[in-house]
Image: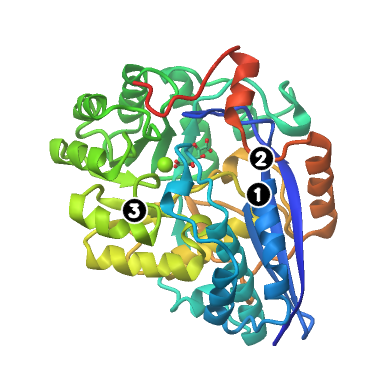
Amino acid sequence: MRITEMHITPIALGDPPLLNAAGLHAPYCLRTVVELVADNGLTGLAEVPGSVAVDAALAAARDTVIGSDPLNWQALRAKVAARSSPETSAARGDKPWDGRTRVQVFSALDVACLDLQGKAYGQPVANLLGGIVRERVPYSAYLFYKYEGAGGELGFGTDPAATGWAAARQRAALDPDGVVAQAVAMVEEFGFESIKLKGGCFPPAEEVAAMQALHRHFGPKVPLRLDPNALWTVETSIAAGRELEGVLEYLEDPCRTQEGMAKVRQALKTPLATNMCTTSFDDLPGSVRTGSEDIILTDHHFWGGLHASMELAAHCRVFGRGVSMHSNNHAGISLAAMTHLGAAMPNLSYALDTHYPWQWEEIIVGGRMKIEGGCVTLPKGPGLGVELDRAALARAQAAYVRCGLKERNDEIEMQKKVPGWKFAATRW
Ligand code: GKR
Ligand code: MG
């Protein structure tokens, strides 16, 4: 099999005004869809977070990709690596999301090659990763503080006809009652059995109060997580962490650096998780040396693909780390890829993150994938088990052109609500 074409399509999907450590989500989240067409007529799909930088890095790899054999991922990866500049984990940046591009190119190519392989062999991607250890992959509810509004074409207004979760998705949630109401609606709709709150938005005491309110409402059997995206100092992390002992399943990235996380970890009984201080294979020696976290949240977009995430899972097993998954806004191609990975990862120890409930549009045939009982069932069919809905893709591509966004910048969006607002790497 040879790759004959590589298509790179930037898209925009509606996204509500969600708050986080770096500001506020814009009315659209950006994704880039990658299609690899092979000489046997098959097409492999992948999806990565969108930005002009990622699109340019993908385009720069095109000449290397065309003519390559998608069955030989290691050879293709080595060729792309040899022709692109190395990127250290420092290039990740200090924002909640990951600023690196090279790992995203690897990820897109790895996923699309696996999709092609699966389609060629008539096998699901999870089998190509080693086999299916679970058909139903558990995800966690992902709560956000938010302003009122739906985002996207629905604008900052609301759809008065909406009911249930669609209505709750539009409502503001800025205090513990709002957070609990959001959680109730999300859990009712999707059946999630774990709950995460995106923190780093308000003074820690307010976020501690929100977690305590969730604990009171849902009881001790529902695992809770809080993720301030490293905006707290070590001292604040220890103080807030102590107030939440017995409340949290894990505390995610309370503060910066492996050394900082290690100090917090020594002071608390609550496990710590990260997608910010241990984010690449280069970081693993430091993680082992310092003992920075208990759980590493992989993300195939940032660890360099599904194979790389499976490799990370093996390291986690050896070094006694739990493993689960981080997410950013995404559509169905990524949800399918995450689900195959979750289905194949033997030591998956926690329900995975997903932003999927916050979107309402889709670019795959059949529309929105189902989350039932908090789980996504492994898609049927070879490869990733999803196909592009060309009309929906064209609509999302047109939205990309119309909205004019070229990269994620939550600070600019936040300044529209709070003039002069500035991102601070450490706030409290
Ligand atoms: O979507 O605002 C967001 C999140 O803050 C996201 O960008 C983070 O990368 O979900 C993320 C996390 O767990 O850090
Ligand atoms: Mg996180």
Front in this rendered view, residue 291 or 178? 291
| In the displayed structure image, the side of residue 254 where residue 170 appears, left or right | right
Q: Percent x, y for residue 7?
A: 77, 64
Residue depicted at x 18% and y 28%: 242
Mark 1 and mark 2 lie on one chain; the one further toward the N terminus is: 1
Which amino acid type corresponds to the residue marked 2 in the rendered image? Glu
Q: Distance between the residues labelled 2 and 3?
A: 26 Å
Which residue carries the number 3 mark?
Answer: 296
Front in this rendered view, residue 196 or 291? 291
Q: From the image, state whether disc 1 or disc 3 is nearer to you.
A: 1
The quadrant where ligand 2 appears is: top left
Q: How far apart are marks 1 and 3 (CA)?
A: 26 Å
Q: Is mark 1 within 8 Å of ligand 1?
A: no
Disc 1 and disc 2 in contact, CB within 8 angstroms: yes
Which residue carries the number 1 mark?
Answer: 53
Which residue carries the number 2 mark?
Answer: 407
Q: Is mark 2 within 8 Å of ligand 1?
A: no
Which amino acid type corresponds to the residue marked 3 in the rendered image? Ile
Label 2: how many residues lie within 10 Å, few (<14), some (14-19) or many (20+)? some
Q: From the image, state whether disc 1 or disc 2 is nearer to you.
A: 1
Mark 1: secondary structure: helix
Q: How is the image coloured?
A: rainbow
Q: Percent x, y for residue 215?
A: 31, 30
Disc 2 and disc 3 in contact, CB within 8 angstroms: no
